[in-house]
Amino acid sequence: MKRIKKYFFVIIIFSILLCIGCNSQEKEEKNEVEGIEIESIESKIEKDEKDIEVRGNVEIINTKISLSMLENHEEAKEYEFFSLNSYGTKEYFVFEGIPMLSFFDIIGINEEFSSAIFEAEDGYKVEISYSDLIKVDYIDEQNEDINYPVVLAWKENGEKYDESEGYPFRLVIGQKEEGDVNKPNWVYNINKIEFIK
């Protein structure tokens, strides 16, 4: 009888130790899983940052441009642009952005180039010559007193572009002359700009 009690006592002790070991292993596994979740969330946040990639065969100092770099620039302001699309629709939009010449300062491009290609996330591209990018006298055919520069915008009609829907940048250009269809040049969700010498 004493032997049975002794074995019973040993079995109980063994069971308790086994349970303690299982709990600590579960905690370690849980911490490992939580570590993976935290790491994947952090990498997702980094991945979700929507910087414009700037490249080309000209010398460029800053090749990744963030939204905050543009928003905090002293030349950032609102512009009211007139647009004419290929269907003849005429509209006004209010954008917040910076003039293209200020963007050139931010990226540190110090030499002339022949053109720049603005590429959207979906692959849509528009190529614009250097002379057209530095123009500051684009017109509004309905208001001859207004002149526009080329603008890189991040806000439209008081609303920031939603980064969950794509890159929050848009190229905006006025008209060269009355009847000029300018809206197709308004590249939306720009993720790359390539400068060509």
Image (spheres, rainbow, N blue to C red):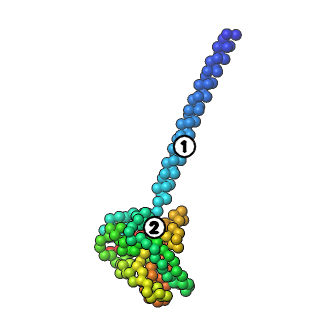
- Please name the residue shown 47% across and 69% down the image: 154
Q: Position of residue 93 (x, y in %)?
A: 51, 77
Q: What is the quadrant of residue 97 in the picture? A: bottom left
- Please name the residue shown 56% across and 34% down the image: 25
Three-letter code, disc 2: Asn
Q: Position of residue 139 (x, y in %)?
A: 44, 85
Q: Position of residue 88 (x, y in %)?
A: 55, 86
Is the residue 190 above or below the residue 85 in the image? above
| Residue position for label 2 | 191
* Quadrant holding the C terminus: bottom left
Is the residue 139 above or below the residue 102 in the image? below
Is the residue 89 above or below the residue 18 in the image? below
Q: Secondary structure at mark 1?
A: helix
Q: Secondary structure at mark 2?
A: strand
- Please name the residue shown 41% across and 67% down the image: 70
Q: Position of residue 111 (x, y in %)?
A: 29, 73
Q: Which residue lies most toward the top here?
A: 2
- Regarding residue 117, the answer to whether it shows in the image is no
* Side of 1 where 89 appears, left or right: left
Mark 1 Cα-neighbour bin, 10 Å: few <14, some 14–19, many ≥20: few
Three-letter code, disc 1: Val
| Residue position for label 1 | 33
